[in-house]
Image (cartoon, helix red, strand yellow):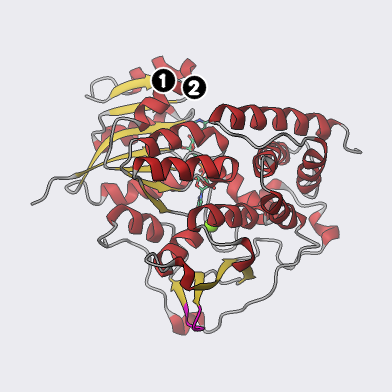
Amino acid sequence: MSQPRTVTVLGATGSIGHSTLDLIERNLDRYQVIALTANRNVKDLADAAKRTNAKRAVIADPSLYNDLKEALAGSSVEAAAGADALVEAAMMGADWTMAAIIGCAGLKATLAAIRKGKTVALANKESLVSAGGLMIDAVREHGTTLLPVDSEHNAIFQCFPHHNRDYVRRIIITASGGPFRTTSLAEMATVTPERAVQHPNWSMGAKISIDSATMMNKGLELIEAFHLFQIPLEKFEILVHPQSVIHSMVEYLDGSILAQIGSPDMRTPIGHTLAWPKRMETPAESLDFTKLRQMDFEAPDYERFPALTLAMESIKSGGARPAVMNAANEIAVAAFLDKKIGFLDIAKIVEKTLDHYTPATPSSLEDVFAIDNEARIQAAALMESLPA
Ligand code: NAD
Ligand code: MG
């Protein structure tokens, strides 16, 4: 039998982290866990580390170090805490690393894993949005294999002509349309976070669920796809497909369209990256086409979903705009989840921040963090000036 593959999961306690661990734990003879990380959920992290006999567990919040040590007592798992420990965990050299920290908070650790030059399964889309150029440069420089986990990008990756990208006529990114696909603007103005996190097809973390509801998620995904596949922006199309069974498509010059299709279960794309270039069995249900019966398609409504337009404009203008947009969006989504602003205010805050703050193109990671930080401050200040 071949040696087990060593794996690390950054963001092990989240929705993607749980699905990843589910696959790893079904195959503990084939995968050996090096490090697991989390932000503040000590119990979940310690339990997973003990179950998988991980070498190290890392909690991002340094004040929780003693709690983690206590939770790991009696096991052989090492405890570590803090931002540097997170980066160290990413650099322990696992053959395969899942980058599933949410938001720009994941950028340093994701980039550290990329710089190790092994295989990185990328879920953390915000890091590509804020620092896509720097990340793709690092992938090239270190000869890293970057495998997209986001279902759309994983679908494109599976259909893409890797030997010659000039064969691509069009890339169609599908979108479910989120929970408010048919909701009027007047009603959207009053929706609660509890309602907005209820996605019709996918079960995900809170932030990405809100991004799906505003359709900012599709905007972030367009930027993510632009960096990952290096295809001109005008060749991308966004198509609303409410059943979420076609996860995205690639059209070739000759008119052939290849689609990746399956039940909406993130364990399919995660499993694809975990076994790559082989394939593995996953518990994802086989799609029953007779039950599905039909597939619907419609154009996105840019009026009701202005976040999508903002994302498209920000990547067209390039420079620091995607980083500013992402930071403002993270602040606005958190404020909406805290019931401090309304649902429609999210895109307004993002737009105002983009209007007020136009920094120069970042040329280093430090520049990206400075821009991200300033954009957060500006977005928070603009939120105060919203009419009550
Ligand atoms: P989540 O909120 O469920 O989990 C986030 C993980 O990151 C947790 O383990 C948390 O402890 C950790 N984390 C949060 N803040 C941190 C910080 N400041 N420092 C260190 N760690 C921190 O999120 P999720 O839904 O699993 O999404 C993870 C990433 O995958 C996101 O970038 C998201 O856009 C992307 N993604 C998710 C899905 C999905 O189905 N959930 C699908 C496609 C892409
Ligand atoms: Mg997606």
Mark 1 in CB contact with mark 2 (< 8 angstroms): yes
The quarter holding residue 273 reads bottom left
CB at disc 2 and ligand 1 closer than 8 Å: yes
Q: Is residue 81 above or below residue 43?
A: above
Amino acid of disc 2: Asp
In the displayed structure image, the side of residue 237 where residue 202 appears, left or right = left
- Give the side of residue 178 with respect to residue 84, left or right: right
In the drawing, does residue 36 fall left or right of residue 312? left
Magenta span of residues: 253-257
Main secondary structure found in the magenta portion: loop
Asked if residue 110 is among those painted magenta in the image, a careful observer would answer no
Label 1: which residue?
Answer: 81
Residue at the location (83% across, 60% down)?
185
Which mark sits nearer the N-terminus, 1 or 2?
A: 2
Residue 236 visible: no
Residue highlighted by disc 2: 61
Instruction: Work out whether residue 342 or residue 99 is closer to the camera in this orientation and state it.
Output: 99
Residue 208 spot, x, y in % from top left: 59, 49
